Image (tube, helix red, strand yellow):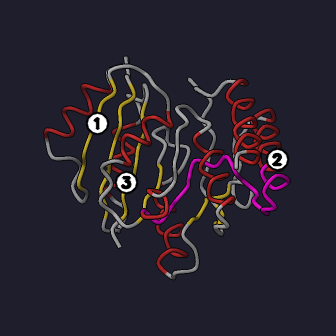
Amino acid sequence: MKLSIIVPIYNEHSTIGQVLDRLAAVPLDKEILVVDDGSTDGSRALLEERAARGGPPGAELRVFFHERNRGKGAAIRTALAHVAGEAVIIQDADLEYDPREIPLLLEPILQGTTGIVYGSRFLGSTRGMKWNHRLANRILTLATNLLYGSRLTDEATGYKLFRADLLASMRLTCERFEFCPEVTATALKRGQRIIEVPLASYEARHLDKKIAWYDGVAALWVLIRERLRP
């Protein structure tokens, strides 16, 4: 099974090279689709140079550019239009999530157990996570479970893996970080089973964190909105 790895990036010049190298080392048939969402820190030039070299050894690399910052959800949806794999995972570019865990997330899909797998920090490691981020994650997960009758432990995880045809069938419109609750709500409303796999190597990063308090409010609103939508 070929895996499409979507990497939305905004001002991650210091880490994107390491992320690409770590993704290339994952022993899977894969493609890497990077969407630079209007970076202003030199990330674009670095990606242009990496793409011109043909990407890291061991992986097909395709790079797309937004001329202005539009948000994580918009970057993901740009990449989705170019996916060639049978499965899709989202990989943040800040080194919080370790690509070596990707094969563990892919396993339930290879076995045909489910079409959606989430990597759970709360079943594994929450190392370095601040109390306010922990609380916000708990609130969003609790709201998801109450609204949709699910039993998730980490709705807001950055590691979400989907069967490609299932993800392509969803009508997704969110532009920013509320993409995560939107895709979760859409899947659960359809009766899809989401399996969680523990993440043992997660480690929170706090420098230049791009998620603000209003992103949490927007995420909660999306969960409620999707529950009420026919």
Label 1 packing within 10 angstroms: few (<14), some (14-19), many (20+)? some
Q: Is residue 142 left or right of residue 155?
A: right
Q: Where is residue 214 in the image (x, y as percent from the top left)?
A: 71, 24
Figure check: 195 above or below 155 = below
Towards the viewer: 216 or 99: 216
Q: Where is residue 166 in the image (x, y as percent from the top left)?
A: 49, 63
For the residues labelled 3 and 2, the Cα–Cα distance comes to 33 Å
| Residue closer to the observer: 46 or 116 | 116
Q: Residues within 10 Å of mark 2 (few under 14, many from 20)?
A: some
Q: What residue did someone put label 2 on?
A: 143
Farthest residue to the bottom: give it. 111
Instruction: Using a 10 Å C-alpha cutoff, classify the residue at mark 3 as few (fewer than 14 neighbours), some (14 to 19) or many (20 or more).
Output: many
The dot on residue 64 is 1
Foreground label between 3 and 1: 1
Residue 164 image point, x, y percent:
42, 62
Type of amino acid under label 2: Ala
- Left or right relative to 52: residue 74: right
Q: What stretch is highlighted in magenta?
A: 144-164
Mark identifier at residue 23: 3
Residue 105's quadrant in the figure? bottom right
Real-space Cα separation, disc 2 to disc 1, in angstroms: 34 Å
**Amino acid type assigned to the residue bearing label 3 in the image:** Leu
Image position of 60 with respect to 210: above or below:
below
Badge 1 amino acid: Phe
